[in-house]
Each structure stands twice: as C-alpha cells, then as structure tokens.
Image (spheres, coloured by chain):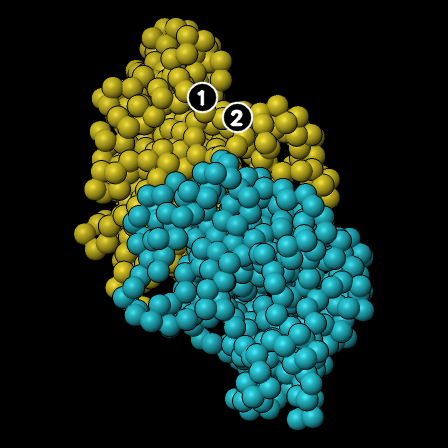
Chain colours: A yellow, B cyan
Amino acid sequence: MSDTFTPKTLGILGGGQLAQMLALAAIPLGVRVVALEPDPQAGARLCAKHLQAPYTDPAGLARLAECDAVTLEFENVPVEALEYLQGRVPVRPGAGLLAHSKHRAREKEGLRAAGVGTADWVTIEVESDLTGALERVSGAGILKTSELGYDGKGQRRVSSEAELTAAWDDLGRVPCVLEGLVPFVREVSLGVARTSGGALAFGPLVENVHRDGILRTSVYLGADQQAAAQAREMARRVAEAWGLEGLMTLEFFELASGELLVNEVAPRVHNSGHLTQDGGGLSQFGAQVRAVLGLPLADWTPLHPTAMVNWVGAEDEAAQPDWAAIDALPGTHIHLYHKAWRSGRKLGHVNLTAPDAETLRERLAQLERLIP
Amino acid sequence: MSDTFTPKTLGILGGGQLAQMLALAAIPLGVRVVALEPDPQAGARLCAKHLQAPYTDPAGLARLAECDAVTLEFENVPVEALEYLQGRVPVRPGAGLLAHSKHRAREKEGLRAAGVGTADWVTIEVESDLTGALERVSGAGILKTSELGYDGKGQRRVSSEAELTAAWDDLGRVPCVLEGLVPFVREVSLGVARTSGGALAFGPLVENVHRDGILRTSVYLGADQQAAAQAREMARRVAEAWGLEGLMTLEFFELASGELLVNEVAPRVHNSGHLTQDGGGLSQFGAQVRAVLGLPLADWTPLHPTAMVNWVGAEDEAAQPDWAAIDALPGTHIHLYHKAWRSGRKLGHVNLTAPDAETLRERLAQLERLIP
C-alpha cells in the first residue's frame, strides 16, 4: 500500500465492551487494534489483537508502545502503565487529563478553573473535614469516594452529621467529596473530541435516565439548540483547559433555569453515546479512533431521533430480554458484549431509531418493557 | 450464560471483505465467526477466527462443521468442501441453490422455471452450438463463460458470427452462454433473505452504475414503490423455487416499459448492498447472519437516502482517493478492507447519507470526484 494508506495501529488499555466497540469502529477506518487486558474472556478479543496480561505487564506495554497511539477504556489507569508509555508513544487522553478525571476533587477543581459550573462540594480527607461540611452544601448531599467509583458504587446519600460520619466510616475513611444535592430537571451528556492539533468536534446532547445508579436509557430527539450550544461551549472550555487529546464525555445536571452544571467527566467514549452507532451519523467510537490517531474529525450527530436502552444483568439470570419481540420492534439494533451474566453487569444495549420524535417515544416505551 | 443466550458461531467459507463485514455485523449480535481462507492477509482475520488453509482442508472443514451454521462469501465453492460439510452442519445457502447460481446456463434455466424473466440466451458448449446462435439473440450479444466469471471478467461482446467464434476461442472454448443485449434504462438490485423456516425479508431496491465491468456507485433515493414491489415479488419466487436458506442478491435490468429482467444472482451479500451499513436501518450483513442462523429477520431498508462509491485500485498506485476531502464531506462513512493495492482490485468503499434525495445527488457528485 502507498504511504497515504499505511494501516495504523491503535493500542487500548482495557479490553471490555468499550474496547470491543472501538475496535469494531476502527477496522473500517483501516485501523487495527491491540488491547492489553488481563481477562481471557474480554469482549475485545473477538476483534482486536488481545494481549492477555496485567495492565502493568512490561511486555504488554512494550507492544502497546509500538502502536501509532494508545487510548483507554477506563479512567483508573495504573500510574506505572502511564509512566512506561509516556515518551514512547502518544497516550491520548494523556496523564494530565487523567489526573483530573480519575479523582473527583481534582476534577471539580479543574472544572471550576476552566470556568464551568459544578455542584457545591467539600473535600473530605481527614476527620476534621467533616465538621461543618454538610452546612456548606446546604444540609444534604452525596458522599462519594474521590477515586474508583462508578455506576453508583462508592456513594452514600446523607442529610445529617451522624449520617455523614457513618457514611465516611462505611466508605473506609478514604478521600471523598461531599457533593451538594442539585435540584436538576434532567441529566444530559455530550462528548467532545480534540486532536493534538487542536481540532474540535462534538457529539449530540443526549438525555439520560439512571436506575439504581446505572444508566438505563439515553435519548436523542433531535437538535436541542439552546442546551446543546451551552453544553458544547462548556465542553470546549474544559477540553482546551485540560489539553484534551482524544475524546471525553461530560455529564451534566440541567437546572429548572436551563443552566447546566457538570456532574462528572469520563475521559473516553461513554455509555450515553452508544446510540450514535445507529443514528445514520458518525459514531462516538469512530470519533475517538479519529481523534486519537489524528485523522480528520467531524461532529457525530445522529440524522434522526435515536435512543438506547441498556441491558443490565438482573438478579435472576433467567430474566432475559424478550429478544424475539425486540427484533420484531421496528428500528431496533442489538449490541451484545459477549460477557458472562452477572447481576448488575452491563451485558449489552439496544439502540432504537425512528423517523420522528413521537414515534421514538412510543417505541422506546415498548422497548423498555421488553428489557427487564 | 443462560440458554437463551448461548453464543452462536458462524462459519464462513472465504475470508475477504465480505467475510470481514459479515463478522463486524455478527459480533454485536452475540455471534462469533470462524473463516476458512488460505490468504494469510485476508481482511476477515482482524475480526474472525482465521483458519488459514485451503477451502478443501480437512481440518479446516472439520472446524467449520462444529459451527452452528456455515455460509460463504463467494459462489464457486469447491465441490469437495460442500460434500464434506453436507450433513455435518447446515450450509446456507445450500448445494442446490449454489448449483444454480455458480453456472450461468443453469441459473437462467432456474430463473425461467421460477417464472421470472431474463435476457434471451443460447447455451454454447460444443462448436455446433455456435451455428445460428447469434440470430436467436437478435444479432448481437455478450458471450460469457458459464462459470468463474466476475466483475466483467470472462465476457466478450459480439455482433457477428466471426466475432462470436473468435470470442469463444479466446475464452478457451469452455461452456458459455450467449446472452442477448438488453436495452435497459438502468440496472438495479435487491437482496432477499429466507430462513430455513421460510420467513422472508428484503433489502432496498438499489440503482447501480458500473465502470469497466466493476460496480462504481449504488444509490438508494427512497422507496421506489412500483419497481421495488416487482423486484420483491421476483426475488420471492426465486427464493422459494430454489429453496433459499440465507441471503441472495438479484441484479436486474429495467426496461423502458418498467419491466424487470433478472441479470444474475449472487448467493450472498453483494457490493450493491453495502450502503445498508450506514442508512440507519439494518444492514445486509446482519441480515445474512440472521437468516443463516435462524435469528428473527426484518427488512433492511435505509431510513434516508444513501449511496455508495467503490474504491477500486487505479492503474497508478499513487492515484489515491482524497481522504481528507472525503472526511470533510458531510455524511460520508469510510470502509476499508485492509487489502494490499492492486490495479482493478476493490480496496474499500465510501457510504454516503443525506437527509433528502436532492442533497444526496449533490454530495454524490462531489464524492465521485474525490475517488479516482
């Protein structure tokens, strides 16, 4: 092949469903994927070169360092892995951005420094930080571990000093942030991609509904001019202030006034962006591959109303989605992760398209009844 | 995983771009792919278990026989391979259908027997068949080898007895058909899928333009009621008469009267159906996977106007598509096959979506200028 067409190789730290879907999007772009992932049954093994080894494995990291660039599918990348890769291969997003996004207190500080709003918060690191903390967030809040929390794990809701103290004990007295409750009217999210040259592109503004702390549905009904413009401007500020290279996703609370506050930032594609796979536009996965490898970027907005429903393992393994009925519902697109069942585990999702917003709402109500 | 969710495995004879795109569509459906393909650099190796061995390799065939079903990406499957697999694993489409589609004379006989129209033709197998043949197709035609022709190879246009004799000599005096010229106004195609239980589904009616015997563009502007209904009815007849299990694609000539004649039949997904990957509906690849494995079927029609332009290797390797400009054109989706350049070889395609037919035509004209 000629120079214009040398196949590129993308390394990924992690080999779960996000890596799998990144690889599925990379192959049509002429890009091969190498995934470093200890789980022998990780989904990415089906469509990537699977290096089955710990994230800190020297041989595995050396192989990743031979790629054109390295990205990640989770935020808690071991420091040793990052230190090895730095200087050997472009890691996107890089260590500076990850230092923000993997730590709730630093994330909030970094967001405020970028000039975007967040919930009020108090950092809790030593026992004396508890004193007066609740008052500073207006009397009620959520105590969250600063690191390693996801899908509602590592969180406790508190509305009294006694509850706050008990919650901190319960969370192991690790560094936490106490966040004030935000009286939001809805939760929305938006992805932003940026190349190392500074080119920017955005995903759609998507509305999200959670259940038991885990994303249940995401919906894109069409252009939402005002909220989307606000979200894009906030995402741009954070992307530029944090020197984003690659893709990150911002989750927002929308207040009754229409104002957006950033809830949290994921330095990667996000569950709420899965609906872009089937909306007729580009997908968040292609966007991350492009941004990380410095390929031309464009916004990844669906062409028509699109939604997603997550399939999360139920308590009872036999409580499966009604696949035949899902298939019979017009506009459904099934995405399975090839993972063994476990209660509370994300096992797949179903995207849904429709020619107009009203039809989408109707079909979404039907689809939700088919996925326990 | 519970019974409802045992991951299925699909075997494919062949490992080129069609197998690659079948595998990319299979993975989200919870299906793993095993491809038997001698080429060590075949594109399917990136997203399927690649058995690198001849199509008749006993160990490779034994591995395919362990799959839930076997399908193919080309029609000229060696008889030995089919004989080994028959009775050990469902092969879809099966030997009966392949016997029709791999041989032009039997194909035409089978089409007529199914009650659908074709061009006039004369079978040329021995020298005496040449006598009077040209008159029987109204004085001009195309001599085509009965087997192994594709992309315009193995064909000669003739309009005199002397040309016909010379052409048959030139083609090695192998069995041929002499087809009458059809005064068509356009070429269209349509896919049909059928499960072993008899469930049917259809793809969109797509309009095709060839260049040097190779597909250049396919366009779907929206529902084309009359022609599509006629094509579906013809496809249904052939699918039922030939006992289709799996997916096949019919290419048609459309006459000025609106009547369709079947030109040829491919027992698989087809280049003209690639545009279904990005139209917001289901794709032909997902449809073939579903039909072959007996999963629920649905029509695979784009939600909005969609087109495709093939990238075929030019004489000069340096004459590459203008990738940056293609990326900058709204609605483009790049699909590359990870194949080494060779003049005349299909190396990739670009799908194009647009909100309406007029915008699609404008963008398609731009896109065509970017792909030599």
Q: Nearer the viewer, residue A329 or B46?
A: A329
Residue B33 as seen in the image, left or right of residue A107:
right
Q: Nearer the viewer, residue B321 or B182?
A: B182
Residue B156: where, in percent of width, then height? Answer: 54, 79
The residue drawn where x is 61% and y is 70% is B181
Query: Are the residues tagged 2 and 1 within 8 Å (C-beta)?
Result: yes
| Residue A207, x across and y down, in percent | 49, 24
Dot 1: what SS? loop
What residue did someone put label 1 on?
A: A224
Callout 2 crowding tier (Cα within 10 Å): few <14, some 14–19, many ≥20: many
The residue that label 2 is drawn on is A221
Q: Is residue B92 above or below residue A33?
A: below
x, y percent for residue A224: 45, 21
| B116 in relation to A97, above or below | below
Q: Chain of mark 2?
A: A
**Mark 2 is on which residue type?**
Leu
Quadrant hosting residue A63: bottom left
* Residue A47 x, y percent position in the rendering: 48, 58
Instruction: Name the amino acid type tagged 1.
Output: Asp
Which residue does the image show at 74% across and 57% down from the upper left?
B234
Nearest the camera: A115 or B210? Answer: B210
Q: CA distance from mark 2 to mark 1?
A: 8 Å
Residue at (76, 53) in percent of width and height: B233
| Image quarter hosting the C terminus of chain B | bottom left
Task: For mark 2, give the secondary structure.
Answer: loop
Query: What residue sits 70% from the left and 66% below the top?
Result: B118
Q: Residue furthest bottom?
A: B127
Q: Residues within 10 Å of mark 1 (few under 14, many from 20)?
A: few
- The disc at residue A356 is none
Residue B243 visible in rendering? no
Q: Which chain is disc 1 placed on?
A: A
The answer to whether one can see residue B309 in this image is: yes
